[in-house]
Image (cartoon, grey):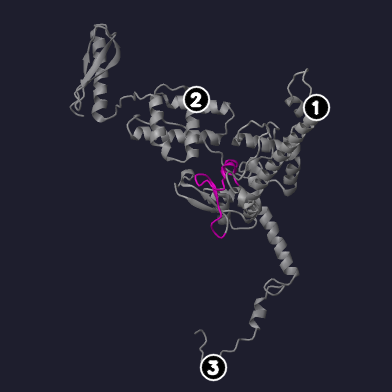
Amino acid sequence: MNEIKVKVVEFRDRKNYMMQFADPVTGRKRTRSTKVERTGRKRDRNEAERVAAKWEADLREGRYKEPSKVTWAEFRDRYEDEVLASLADRTEQKVCGIFNMLEDLLSPSRLRDLTADRLSFYQRRLREMGRQETTIDGHLAHLVAALNWAVGIGLLTEVPAIKRPKRVKRSGKTDKMKGRPITLEEFERMMAKTEATLAKPVGSAARRKMPANPKRRFSDEAVAARLGRLKERAAAISSSWRHYLTGLWRSGLRLEESLELSWDDEGKLCVDLSGEHPMLRIPAELEKGHRDRLWPLSPEFAEFLLATPEDNRTGYVFNPMPRREDSTRLQPHRVGEVVAAIGKAAGVKVHVDPRTSKVKFASAHDLRRSFGERWANRIMPTDLMILMRHESIETTMRFYVGRNAQNTAKTLWEAHKTAVSSNTFGNSSEIPSPAKEETRAEPQVPTGVRKGG
């Protein structure tokens, strides 16, 4: 780059002095404005020369980088084709959602439009929309990864300095679940309220379904038949949702996982009954490690699955029915809304916002929390991490083992009292004193055997 020589040039159609150099590699001339008005005065000419000299020094020392001309659309197409296509489907969907949100809020024309200032504005808009700080940090983490990739292949000169949100220091008050594990009694209340929450008023529904033609009359048999069909469908709907809630309670599956779980489709989360115990098979396409994995199922969920007749073990394991007859299979967000509606009907409150007093009722994830709470008292933390499919033991310890410290202490004291009362603490209710230890008879050593041998 030492061969670069920048000189000041004048063009009749330009208001300012221009500066220009010939690229030593390609031989092409590069021109840019000095931003000094072309007045013809020596003072202005000298100022333009100083600007040109500074650009020349930056070029020779590698400090100057030409701004990227890549459009945002071009960058997104390449990133989706060359990077996201190789990642798990859920990761690809998440990043595409972030890109969609970015386009809605910032409308970038070129990739270089994502400056530090614009991304700071993006954070502010997300907060105004009610997004949590952890969500905002996740958005920025994916954007930084994408911009680093762009720099690596030469689409962008540098990644803007992005100030990510500072994580709230974890403490006893802030390190809490957004909900809570629900009790067996609360779960039974939800089961009892399922039919009332889901079933439509049969009589009025039947009348709404009849054609609104006053000249056409229906026989009592036709109306009775219609009512019978609606009652049967209402019973089937309630049964499918009670089956689904029971599955969530016994499995600890996440909402999306439960709706993807299949009996026989190996391209999805799949039940594996080929071994000694039922297992959960996760295909490589859905795993961050890109490897097929087998995960254990809890015995209570395995028994629940095995209760399904073999002839019915096809397709999805869970099919909570929609109320509309012409509706397609429900999407995860809609299923979550229905479960929350059942929790509300049952009056199961899991959280109250201290600032707004807004009440959160039991959701599908609270059933997963209940599963984790039950098994935290039965198995070791490392086994619980595998059962819950957590990425790290810290998550398991924080949300299930650490929060059970009081329960563990209570269990220890109850066990201690039981041991003392039943005279099973070291085969004696007392701890032997040193004096008593000294008075014990020394065991006889057989002939021919040395002590300490």
What residue is disc 2 on?
121
Q: Residues within 10 Å of mark 3 (few under 14, many from 20)?
A: few
Instruction: Choose top left, top right, bottom left or bottom right for residue 231.
Output: top right
Residue 133, given in percent of the width and then of the height, sits at 55, 34
Q: Residues within 10 Å of mark 2 (few under 14, many from 20)?
A: some
Of helix, strand and loop, which one carries label 2?
helix
Q: Is residue 270 magenta?
A: yes
Q: How far apart are the two marked residues, 1 and 3, measured between alpha carbons?
A: 107 Å
Residue 401, given in percent of the width and then of the height, sits at 61, 52
Q: Residues within 10 Å of mark 1 (few under 14, many from 20)?
A: few
Q: How far apart are the two marked residues, 1 and 2, measured between alpha carbons?
A: 66 Å
Marking on residue 447: 3
Q: Is 53 left, or right, of 127 in this rendering? A: left
Residue 247 visible somewhere in the drawing? yes
Residue 334, given in percent of the width and then of the height, sits at 63, 34
Q: Is 119 left, or right, of 178 in this rendering? A: left
Of helix, strand and loop, which one carries label 1?
loop
Magenta region's main secondary structure? loop
Instruction: Choose top left, top right, bottom left or bottom right for residue 67.
Output: top left
Cβ–Cβ under 8 Å for marks 1 and 3: no
Q: Amino acid at mark 3?
A: Thr
Q: Amino acid at mark 2?
A: Phe
Q: Earlier in the sequence, mark 3 or mark 2?
A: 2
Q: Earlier in the sequence, mark 1 or mark 3?
A: 1
Q: Nearer the viewer, residue 390 or 341?
A: 341
Q: Residue at x 71, y 61 (%)?
A: 413
Q: Amino acid at mark 1?
A: Ser
What residue is disc 1 on?
219
Start-end of magenta stretch: 253-276
